[in-house]
Image (cartoon, rainbow, N blue to C red):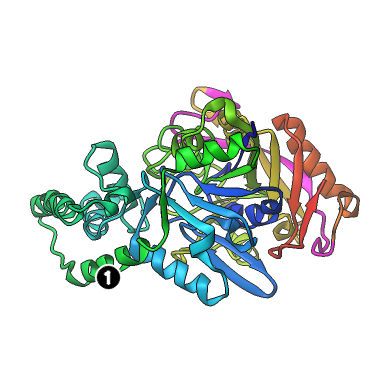
Amino acid sequence: MEKVDVILGLQWGDEGKGKVVDVLTPRYDVVARFQGGPNAGHTLEFDGQKYILRSIPSGIFQGGKTNIIGGGVVVDPVLFRDEAEALARSGHDLTRQLAVSKKAHLILPTHRVLDAAYEAAKGDQRIGTTGKGIGPAYTDKVSRNGLRVGDLLEPDFRARYERAKGRHEAILRSLGFAYDIAELERQWFSAVEYLRNYRIIDSEYVINKMLCEGRSVLAEGAQGTLLDVDFGSYPFVTSSNTVCAGACTGLGVAPNRIGEVYGIFKAYCTRVGSGPFPTELFDETGRRMREIGREYGAVTGRERRCGWLDLVALKYAVMIDGVTQLIMMKADVMNDFDTIRVAVAYDTPAGRTEEFPFEAGGELRPVYREFPGWKCDLGHARCYDDFPAELRAYVEFIEQQTGVPVRIISVGPDRGQTVVR
């Protein structure tokens, strides 16, 4: 029986997972998203074109592959239709390549309104959500009030929708939040009809049957480990389990069916929205990282906060996820820096620690180790031996600290700018 290999981010998301999934997909028969919603933007660039995926797995660009939106995902029919129609215009036939799990939950129009209402109520304590209704949809899931994609096939779907809408409107009245969802609702029901054109499947049976038949599966995560609802920098986290174990619950595969775990990280760190970020830079160096790395949200356009690589957080993520192979993205962003710093510990009021703390903010101060920059263009490198000694030293230090090999190093946004060791 085949194993499910898992690919996920090890930082606060935006690590470049989409490109790596696209590069790895030729090795697999199936690519499946296992959690998250349309707040996740995976950017892929090849053949001079740029594509942004929200909910659809990144394997969609490799012909003949099966792509599955798993049960752990929350789906907004309107955004799904927008995304699918844009891909169809670029020549990709999704109706044959893509299936959606019956157990995936639906994001309703009132979920978006609730998202805005909850953020407004928090005032200065707001988390910085994308406002797409992700959190409220997962809240309904956990409170056993959610609507699922499989409900679309039931004759009383409209009645189920109205009951859910009624619950949400009662909450909105209690918050005193003004809203009008008439247009959102019109678009939503039109998009629901579009979604019904796709294969709606019992994905847990389909995936396990494929494994029994010897077909290979790649599970694709969204966001990053440090945004996991249980193990991330709570409460500034997403609403799902972004760690490797989330692939089991999001796809319905047993833990002993997990094979390789590819952990993706940037050569530095970024974060979108609020929350602790120990190595964040507020100076010209941080601004240079943002501009060179084009660190703006793929879906929202929001500026990403930038800082040095945090090995304390990275080792924590490697441990939680059981990473077997590391993938380093955006090494080329650091081409022109004279000195590169890496956090190897934190100084706290209780002393120095190399463990990721319960709360990663406050009086925590990173302890850095410095490396000389490589000061050259990496864009044309095609093998590890093409790298300067300074970059190889940086990579090998990360391997020594994490105990995991760095197998892939990205040196540019294009599909071909990927060095596999």
**The N terminus, quarter of image:** top right
| Residue denoted by label 1 | 187
User: Where is residue 284 drawn, in percent x and y?
Assistant: 61, 61
Which region shows up in magenta?
A: 351-380
Question: In percent of the image, x 41 and y 70: which residue is there?
Answer: 82
Q: Is residue 223 visible?
A: yes
Mark 1 element type: helix
Disc tally is 1
Prevailing secondary structure of the magenta residues: loop
Left or right for 110, reference 381: left
Q: Amino acid at mark 1?
A: Gln
Residue at 24% across / 37% down in the picture? Answer: 144
| Viewer-proximal residue among 92 and 231 | 92
Up the image or down, 405 lies above or below 196; here it is above
Q: Looking at the rendering, in which quadrant would you find the C terminus?
A: top right
- Residue in front for this viewpoint, 94 or 224: 94
In this image, 196 relative to 387: left or right? left
